[in-house]
Amino acid sequence: MRYSKKEIFTIPNLLSVFRIVLIPIYAVLYMKAQVAKDYIIAAAVFVASAVTDMFDGIIARKFNMRSRIGIMLDPFADKLTQGVVILCLTIRNLEILPLLVIFIIKEGFMFVMACRLLHSGKMLDGALFAGKICTAVLFISMAALVVFKDISTAGTYSIVALCSVFMIISLVSYAKCFFTASEHIRDIDE
């Protein structure tokens, strides 16, 4: 499968690459953070990533810049960002561990199913609504956990529970999509 330069070098794809570049910057800033200002700076990098995620989709739709590579690159950047942020949070606060476990299960399932689709010449045509809501809840919740590092145990568990529920709903929605004849699955060459 060959991609043209026009399909690769779109603004949405460049924004997705920018989000990937922000991941190690965020991780270093967060893991070295010691005072409130440090956590706010790390959160600002994370929020910049979330904002570019929102804009790449809007730009892709509004200016007809959707591409096959973008359909794969955008969720890859999302999941990589989410995974690193959850991992960093878990390293600093073991109360986040259940969220990390659910994230790994969900994304492991998604990866295996996406590979199966690709092997059969098909792909998921963008994110499902449940996935978009889950991503929004995760981004907001994780930003709160980064900024408010001294949140109470009950507050942390509440956020973990909320995110876990949305992840499970998203997982069920995608499982239903993968195992039924869904209109969200299309041939790669379309």
Image: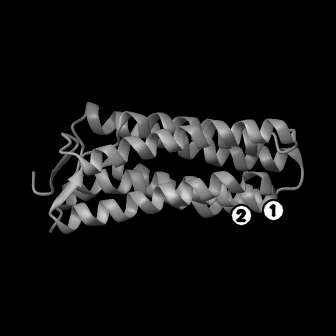
Q: Position of residue 74 (x, y in %)?
A: 38, 51
Q: Position of residue 178 (x, y in %)?
A: 28, 50
Secondary element at image label 1:
helix
Whether the residues at callouts 1 and 2 have beta carbons within 8 Å, the answer is yes
Residue in view at x 42 percent, y 35 percent:
130
Q: Residue furthest left?
A: 190
Does the rendering let one see residue 9?
no
The answer to which image quadrant residue 92 occupies is bottom right
Q: Residue furthest top?
A: 62
Q: Position of residue 188 (x, y in %)?
A: 15, 57
Q: Pointer 2: what residue?
A: 28
Amino acid at circle 1: Lys
Q: Position of residue 168 (x, y in %)?
A: 51, 43
The quadrant in which the N terminus is found is bottom left
Give the left or right position of residue 124, taking residue 152 as reference: left
Residue in view at x 71 percent, y 63 percent:
28
Q: Pointer 1: what residue?
A: 32
Q: Residues within 10 Å of mark 1 (few under 14, many from 20)?
A: few
Q: Residues within 10 Å of mark 2 (few under 14, many from 20)?
A: few
Amino acid at circle 2: Val
Give the left or right position of residue 135, taking residue 62 as reference: right
Relative vertical location of residue 117 with respect to residue 171 in this rendering, above or below? below
Secondary element at image label 2:
helix
Structural distance between the alpha carbons of marks 1 and 2: 6 Å
- Which of 44/124 is in front? 124
Give the left or right position of residue 123, taking residue 128 as reference: left
* Colour approach in the figure: one colour
Residue in view at x 70 percent, y 45 percent:
43
